[in-house]
Image (tube, rainbow, N blue to C red):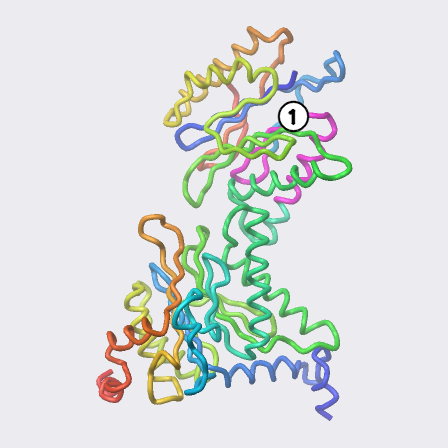
Amino acid sequence: MARRYDSRTTIFSPEGRLYQIEYAREAISHAGTVLGILAKDGVVLAAEKKVTGKLLDLSSAKEGGYGGSGEKIFLLNSNVIAGVAGITADANSLVNYARTAAQRHLFSYNEDIPVEQLAQRLCDLKQGYTQYGGLRPFGVSLLYAGYDVHYNFQLYHSDPSGNYSGWKATCIGANNGTAQSLLKQEYKDDITVEEAIGLAVRVMGKTMDSTTLGSEKLEFAVLTLDKTTKQPHAKIYKPAEIDALLSKHGLAKKEEDAEMRAV
Amino acid sequence: MECQVALTGKGYVLVAADTVAARSIVKMKHDEDKIKVLGSHLLMSYSGEPGDTVQFAEYIERNLRLHQIRYLQPLRPSPAAAWIRRQLADSLRSRSPYSVNLLVGGYDIATSEPHLYWVDYLGTLAHVPYAAQGYGSYFVLSLLDRYHNPEATLEEGIETLKRCIAEMEKRLIVGLGKFKVKIVDKDGAREIEL
C-alpha cells in the first residue's frame, strides 16, 4: 500500500506525509557530518569526508584550486561558503545554481548577495521538486556560512523539503544528534572564531565514525572579515593546513586517544 | 527647462526639483511633485520626456516596494541605484527606451552614510557629492563647486541649496517657479520647506 505513495514525490500519503522527502532526509543522515558554528567575528564550517582511500588522487586538493577537495565545502560567493551533506552529485548541481544566482545578483545590484536571499533562492528550487510531478527531490542539506551588512555573520541550514532556518551552531549528516548536544553544551553566545575553531575540531573528533582525525578525512573552512579591507574573507583549508590545525589542538593522529580522555 | 539639484551633507541628502509641468511654451501646472519617496530612506527625483518620467518612476517605486515585501528589508541606496541604472540601460537597448534622468539620494542605515547617485537616460551611474540636471546645472554646478561641504550641517546645506535656487531664479531666462525640497537622513525621507 505504501508503495503507491512512495513512488511519487508530489503525492501525500493518507497520513499526510511525503515519503520521498523523508527518504531524502534519511539519505542525508548517513552522509558525512558537516557542522557549522557562528562566532561573533566569523563563522566556522567543518566536514567529514567519506570518499577516501589510499588510491584516491588528492593532488588537486593539495595545490591549486581555492582549498578543499571539492567534496564537502564550497565557495558559493565571495561572502558565502557552504557545507553539503547528502548526494554529492545533487550537491554539485545546487552549488552551481547558487553560484549562478549569486553572480546574477551581483550583475543586477552591484553588491554581494545577502546570505539569507541566497539561501531562499536555493530553497525555492528545492521546494519546487516537492511539488511538481515526476521528479526526485534534491537529496542534499546545506549549511551556509556567510556575511552581509544586514545581519553580519550568519549560519543557515536548508533541507530537501525547502525549509531553511538560521542557527548559532548546528550539524547535519551522520551523528548529527550527538554533535548537536555537544554544541548545545559548549556553545557560548560571545564565542570568538578562535574558540569556535577549537570547538569545531573537538566536536568533529568526538562524532566522526573513524578513530583517526586527519586531513584525508576532514574539510575545514572559516569566514572572517579582512582586517584592512573589512571585506569578508573565506578561507577553505588545504590538507597541510588542516593537519597543522589538528596538531595545534592536540588532535593529530597519535595523541588522539589521550586527548579524548582529557576533554 | 526642468531642473533638479541634490547635495549631500553630514548625515543627510537634500534633493530639490522644480514643480512645473510644461507642454511646449505653456505651463500646465505649477505644483507637480517630481521627487518620489522610494522607501523609508530613499528618494529619487526625475526629469525628462513627460509621460516617460512618471511611468518609469512608478515602475521603479512599485518594484522596490515588491523587493521590500519579499525580502523584509529595503534595498540599500547603492544596490537600488545599480538596479535602477540597469533598468535604464536595458530600456535604452529596447524598441522603446525611456528618456528619463534621475538623481537618487539615500541614507544607508547599515553603514550610517548618506549617498547620492547621478543617473541619466543612457544608463550612466555616478556616485557624487552633489549633482544638478537641466539648464539650471550650468549655474548651479559652479556654485556647488565653490560652496559644497560634505561636512556641512543641515542649516548650512539648506543655505547652499537656497543660494543655488536663487541663482537659477536670477540667471535663467524662464523662471522655474517654486522648488520642492525633500531630505533623507537617519530619520527617513520627508519633505521640508525652505
Q: Is residue A199 left or right of residue B111?
A: left
Q: How many marks?
A: 1
Q: On the image, numbered disc 1 is attached to which residue? A: B47
Residue A233 is one of the magenta-drawn residues: no
Quadrant where the image shows the N terminus of chain A: bottom right
Residue B179's x, y, as percent? Answer: 58, 18
Q: Position of residue B49 (x, y in %)?
A: 72, 26
Residue A116 position in % (x across, y down): 52, 59
Is residue B51 within the magenta segment?
Answer: yes
Between A257 and A241, the residue placed more toward the observer is: A241
- Compared across the picture, whether B125 is left or right of B163 comes to right
> Where the C terminus of chain A falls, by quadrant?
bottom left
Q: Nearer the viewer, residue A54 or B5?
A: A54
Residue at (56, 63) in percent of width and height: A98
* Location of residue B164 in the rendering, given as x and y in whole percent from the top left corner: 50, 15
Q: Which type of secondary structure does the marked residue at label 1 adopt?
A: strand
Residue at position x 39%, y 85% from top?
A208
Q: Quadrant of residue A199?
A: bottom left
**What residue do we see at 53% from left, 74% from top?**
A141
Looking at the image, residue A185 lies above or below residue B165: below
Rendering quarter of residue A167:
bottom left
**Crowdedness near tag 1: few (<14), some (14–19) or many (≥20) residues, C-alpha within 10 Å:** many
Q: Which residues are magenta?
A: B37-64
Q: What residue type is disc 1 on?
A: Ser
Q: Where A141 sits versus A228, above or below?
A: below
A24, A255: nearer the viewer:
A255
